[in-house]
């Protein structure tokens, strides 16, 4: 497997941080001030685009197994959201609370968890690229083991 260079991963990590951090900040502001939903949603769309593009490029250029899985599952989720969008507001008048919870979960919470996973995965790849003993480590270690070992 052709591994991404430290420089490529660094650029990827900086770009992702530049879009994911404003997205998370927007979501936190949204909790306090719901009228900021447009900022939060636009930041999330930009973060999603950047991460999908990153996943696609890493899948093609480096044949990174984790990125291929991420890209395929993320695209399935995007297609799923496109398909269910007409049904999200179908019963808005009769069941407003459950609809709002569903929309928040499907449109804000799950994508934020996916974005968080991907930026952590990129950080783990960055750490592995910096490690001089990179060849001795198993590149496909469990993500949680890598995150716990960073502290």
Image: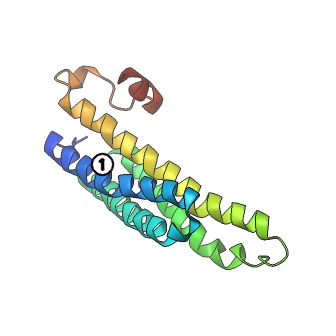
Q: Residue at x 48, y 63 (%)?
A: 75
Q: Relative to the observer, which residue lies in front, 135 or 104?
A: 104
Q: Position of residue 110 (x, y in %)?
A: 57, 54
Say left or right for 16 vs 116.
Answer: left
Q: Is residue 50 above or below residue 16?
A: below
**For mark 1, does the 10 Å Cα neighbourhood hold few (<14), some (14 to 19), or many (20 or more) residues?**
some
Q: How is the model colour-coded?
A: rainbow
Say left or right for 68 vs 34.
Answer: left
Q: Quadrant of residue 150?
A: top left
Q: Relative to the observer, which residue lies in front, 126 or 67?
A: 126
Q: Quadrant of the C terminus?
A: top left
Give the residue number, with chain letter if any, for mark 1.
63
Label 1: state its secondary structure: loop
Q: Quadrant of the N terminus?
A: top left
Q: Is residue 33 above or below residue 2?
A: below
Say left or right for 17 vs 39.
Answer: left
Q: Position of residue 29 (x, y in %)?
A: 49, 58
Q: Position of residue 85 (x, y in %)?
A: 63, 75
Q: Quadrant of residue 97?
A: bottom right
Q: Position of residue 2 (x, y in %)?
A: 21, 42
Q: Is residue 14 above or below residue 108?
A: above
Q: Residue at x 37, y 57 (%)?
A: 22
Q: Is residue 107 in sight in this rendering?
A: yes
Q: Residue at x 42, y 58 (%)?
A: 23
């Amino acid at each position: 497997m052709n591994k991404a260079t430290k420089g490529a991963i660094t650029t990827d990590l900086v770009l992702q941080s530049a879009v994911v951090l404003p997205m998370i900040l927007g979501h936190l502001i949204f909790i306090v001030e719901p009228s900021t939903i447009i900022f939060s949603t636009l930041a999330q769309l930009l973060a999603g685009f950047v991460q999908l593009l990153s996943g696609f490029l890493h899948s093609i250029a480096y044949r990174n197994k984790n990125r291929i899985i991420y890209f395929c599952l993320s695209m399935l989720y995007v297609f799923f959201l496109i398909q269910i969008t007409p049904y999200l507001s179908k019963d808005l008048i009769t069941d407003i609370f459950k609809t709002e919870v569903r929309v928040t979960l499907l449109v804000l919470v799950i994508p934020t968890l996916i974005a968080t996973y991907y930026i952590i995965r990129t950080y783990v790849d960055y750490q592995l690229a910096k490690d001089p003993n990179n060849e001795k480590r198993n590149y496909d270690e469990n993500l949680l083991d890598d995150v716990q070992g960073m502290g």
